[in-house]
Amino acid sequence: MPEFPALPTARSTPHGEAPTALAADVAIVGGGPAGMTAALYLARFRRSVVLVDAQQSRLAAVPLSHNYPGFPQGIAGADLLGALRAQLTPYPVAWLHDTAQAAQRTDEGFVVRCASGTVRSRRLLLATGVRDIAPRAPHMRDALARGALRYCPVCDGYEVRDRTVGVYADGAAGVGEALFLRHFTPHVTLFLDGGSATLGPEDAGRLQQAGVRLAAGAVDAIDYRDGRITVTHGPARSTCDSLYCALGLQVHHGLALQLGAACGEDGYVRVDGHGATTVQGLYAAGDVAEGLNQVAVAAGNAAIAATAIHRSLLRGG
Ligand SMILES: Cc1cc2nc3c(=O)[nH]c(=O)nc-3n(C[C@H](O)[C@H](O)[C@H](O)COP(=O)(O)OP(=O)(O)OC[C@H]3O[C@@H](n4cnc5c(N)ncnc54)[C@H](O)[C@@H]3O)c2cc1C
């Protein structure tokens, strides 16, 4: 595993005290890979940047990623976050470790309000990500760290090839995930909160045809022990090497909605090919915007959005 310097202390004010008002060309809300990549690009475009971050990046929960380019042995999410923060250290990016509670459009641009202060900016980039809805069961943090609980077959389906895998869902959304995973292993079982009876005959038929087992009883308990997960469903119990939780996501689109930006029915903020939302001067990148929820995509789209923001500032307004 690569070694990175210790995380730099984030700067909120020159004296480390909570600021009352900051101003910048660009305010970025969200300091995961999308927000930090955008901050890097913008700082290198010699734009003043304030980065507001509540420090709950999804990336921090990634035990070891094998699909982020450039790391042959894989990289832990926490290490990648540390490397991104270290890369920003030489640049004059102002950090506010706080939650942005409200955002408003003004004649000059935007105002973002947090408990500890206010940020005024000409452009605003939302990189606020999403949150996975976790199963209500004990020890899930440990299970996640050990790869027994998983959320993202695109990320790590390869790691469970030929293993015994479960998908836990509360509806038909689990069918697509189970079928996706069937490509990697023949041992896939779909566990539904309400039991198999909650699924329509068409979906049940698709599962049967693909060789995915549909557990009969409603899920009563999920237990993690010795690196494996046991699901109790009705009178039966099934144990799997990994359980994929498909309960869905909460998209952090609250600020976008406050500002009047369009979001899809799935909750994702609508953006064009440059990361621009439907509100003039407001951009979004990373998991919060439509697209594939992946680190490489978050970084790539943030680079595109940052460059578009820089160009729009060159044009003025
Ligand atoms: C278990 C797991 C495994 C994964 N494995 C992989 C993998 O192998 N490969 C891969 O490519 N991807 C993987 N992912 C997905 C990857 O973590 C995300 O795609 C990536 O972190 C998205 O980056 P982001 O910057 O858009 O959002 P995030 O990293 O979630 O960052 C968003 C930031 O915004 C902050 N924020 C939100 N709202 C506010 C607010 N109002 N005010 C201030 N701050 C706010 C949050 O606190 C957070 O710090 C995995 C995810 C999980 C959960």
Image (spheres, helix red, strand yellow):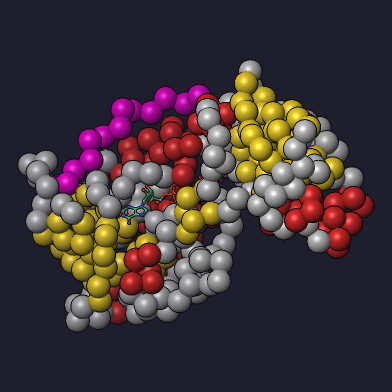
Q: Is residue 309 magenta?
A: no
Residue at 33% from the left image edge and 28% from the top image edge: 5
Q: Is residue 10 magenta?
A: yes
Residue at 23% from the left image edge and 64% from the top image edge: 112
Considering every residue shown, the one lying at the far right of the view is 209
Considering every residue shown, the one lying at the far front of the view is 235
Please state the horizontal and vertical placement of residue 227, each as a whole percent of the image. 64, 22
Residue toward you, 260 or 110: 260
Relative side of 198 to 130, left or right: right
Please state the horizontal and vertical placement of residue 28, each as a whole percent of the image. 31, 59
Please state the horizontal and vertical placement of residue 2, each as a whole percent of the image. 47, 26
Compared with residue 208, is residue 89 higher up or lower down, i.e. above or below? Answer: above
> Can residue 101 be seen in the rendering of this structure?
yes
Magenta span main SS: loop
The image quadrant that residue 213 belongs to is top right
> Can residue 153 be seen in the rendering of this structure?
no
Residue toward you, 231 or 17: 231
Residue at 43% from the left image edge and 48% from the top image edge: 33
Residue at 62% from the left image edge and 28% from the top image edge: 223
Compared with residue 209, is residue 240 higher up or lower down, i.e. above or below? Answer: above
Residue toward you, 217 or 156: 217
Q: Which residues are magenta?
A: 1-13
Please state the horizontal and vertical placement of residue 56, each as a whole percent of the image. 38, 44
Relative side of 140 to 183, left or right: left
Q: Quadrant of the C terminus?
A: bottom left
